[in-house]
Amino acid sequence: MLLPPRHCLSAALTLALTSPLLMAQEPEIPGPNPQRVSTERLGETMQTLCAAPRFAGSESSQQATKYAAEVFAEAGLEVDLAHYQCYLPRQISQSLFVESSDGDWQELNLFEQGYEQDPRTLSHHIPPMHGLTFPGNAEGKLWYAGYGTEREFAQLAKKHGEAIHGGVALVRYGALYRGLKVANAEKYGFSAALLYTDEEEDGAPRGKVLPQGPWRPASGIQRGSVYNADGDPLTPGWAAVEGAPRIAVEDAQGMVGIPSLPISSGNAARLRAGAGKKLGPLPSRVRMHVEQDPTPVPVTNVIGRITGSTHPDEWIVIGAHRDSWGYGAIDNGTGSTVLLETARVVGEALAEGWRPQRTIIFASWDAEEWGLVGSTEWVEEHLTDLRTHAVAYLNMDVVATGPDFRASCTPGLVESLEHGCSSRGIPMPGGVGVPGGGSDHVPFLELGGIEVLAFGFHGGSGVYHSAMDTPYLIEEFLDPEYRHHAEAASFAVTMLDHLSKANTIVDGRRRWLQQILAAADKLPQETTEQELVRLKVLHAAENFALRLYRDVEDIPTANAFRFARHFLPEGGRSFLWRSAGYGSAWFPDLQASYGEEPRQDLVLSATALIDAFGNAHESLRKPSDPTGK
């Protein structure tokens, strides 16, 4: 090989040593620093957020919407407001009467009793209501239905027959999502349902009640949605933007068809009239009324974006819902406060010249309490882009009520969770599994096939969805110095810094396959038919795993490998994992078909799941999509 003259080498060497491009590189600008999280600022944020109730769509909630947008903008994020018009009927009146022994009707006080130590508890109460319940009147004999499970209602029907028809079910919270309780009552012929939180769950038997302690007083009630689906009921599968087509209310899926109300443990005890908590008839007869305004209401998500420097087409999304059933300090002032503090700390790093390699999107969701409405509408509006670009979604819902760290995540984020725990000196929680239902991660996982993570620091209290959920509870009992909030924010900062690096691998293939095989092996096998289905599904899953590893050269590893995206049917939800209320299930369509008639449904569901394994394999091997993106 011919070498250049010595003087040319010398000149080239001189040029190399003096060239700005080849001289020693500038020190790397450090990323967001978790140590910059401020407990003082967290407390101020909580007080600002809880200055007024954040009832979705209400005028008072607009103050918090504006505040979140201002914080994002001050942190240097590109801010966008995502507006939707949704069917969230407002309850404008309600009543509950009980018939006395002499035939008179006595009205019960359905509202909570506040206390002077916390002026917020004395005013601006949201009505005692269930979101998306059925309006109307009902009158009938009262029946105690335990936790309102299918089994308990079936026992009532078996023992009492048609006598239960037209009655009103008294149901305690616990065991399953409230919407399923009301749906079960409707299925078994009840005309209405009353739901209460038993004091054994979160009242005086647990400890001192408010204002002396963090547990629920006898007048406390638990509001909440009884909608058995997600998103705006009238725009299923598409975003409820202005001008969007809408179905009729009577055609909406997941709506209950009987009225329901939440009541206090004190009122429930009065209605039981000493009858105890045994399934069966109660001595009371009740009359109830629920009136609503069905006018669509505005729902607004606040979105803040930082475009990635080298991999802008790979998105890390972090979110917390902003709305509440009142002042909502715990649910979800904790998550919103931590989200805004995380944005501020990330913004400080931006101001000093740092930029994430991947795009980071901050989201303050609206109307989560009505059925994950804000997040679902946003996911539906941006579904194609999210399936293509989103690498991970981090959810923060009730994240700072005590010292105990808990987390759940999909398989692709287990290593990142381990990194976050190690970095913060937090023991990795045991039994980490895929998150269940009930919060804003659901549409990302089940519609988008995106890896999701939920985490928080937890303790005990009894004000869930109550007018008593105010900063007083946090500052007097749960986190007086906002240290748990600071831990949550520091963990969020650590996770964002880690995941925003392009070389951070989010690839859950091996762990997804392990969990799929374990779930298939645990399918019911009580009958010959069930055992045959289990073996066929397990065989298909094993076949899929073997082919995936056999074709590893055709499906190369990628730092952002979107495994679960390939198990999404056209216009539907994941074949692998789906939520129902607070619970979730592997292979949901197949699981739902067990015990149903006709038996052909079981075979059809199994066939659809087996086909999904084949389709996922073909999708993963497409030359146009070699990395699973």
Image (spheres, grey):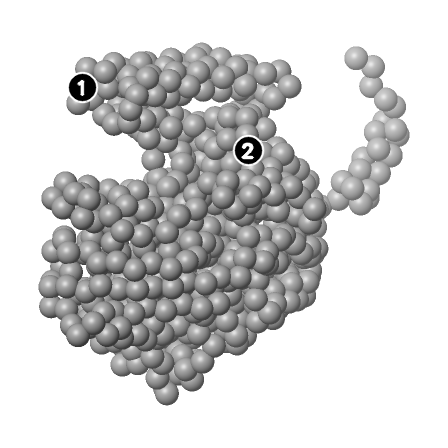
> Could you tell me residue 305's position as x and y percent?
66, 51
Nearer-the-camera pick, 396 or 592: 592
Q: Nearer the viewer, mark 1 or mark 2?
A: 1
Rendered residue at 29%/70% (across/down) = 97
> Could you tell me residue 222's position as x and y percent?
34, 64
Please identify the quarter of the rendering in which residue 535 is found.
top left
Nearer-the-camera pick, 207 or 58: 58
Report the quarter where the N terminus lies: top right
Rendered residue at 44%/16% (across/down) = 611
Report helix, strand or loop for mark 2: strand
Rendered residue at 24%/42% (across/down) = 150
Label 1 vs 2, first from the N-terminus:
1
In this rendering, is residue 161 above or below 260? above
Q: Which residue is mark 1?
A: 527
In the picture provided, is 284 more to the left or to the right than 324? left
Residue at mark 1 to residue at mark 2: CA–CA distance: 42 Å
Please identify the quarter of the rendering in which residue 17 is found.
top right
Res. 424 mark: none
Crowding around mark 1 (Cα neighbors within 10 Å: few <14, some 14 to 19, many 20+) is few
Looking at the picture, which amino acid does disc 2 mark? Answer: Ala
Res. 560 mark: 2
Rendered residue at 19%/56% (across/down) = 144
Looking at the picture, which amino acid does disc 1 mark? Answer: Thr
In the picture provided, is 602 more to the left or to the right than 19? left
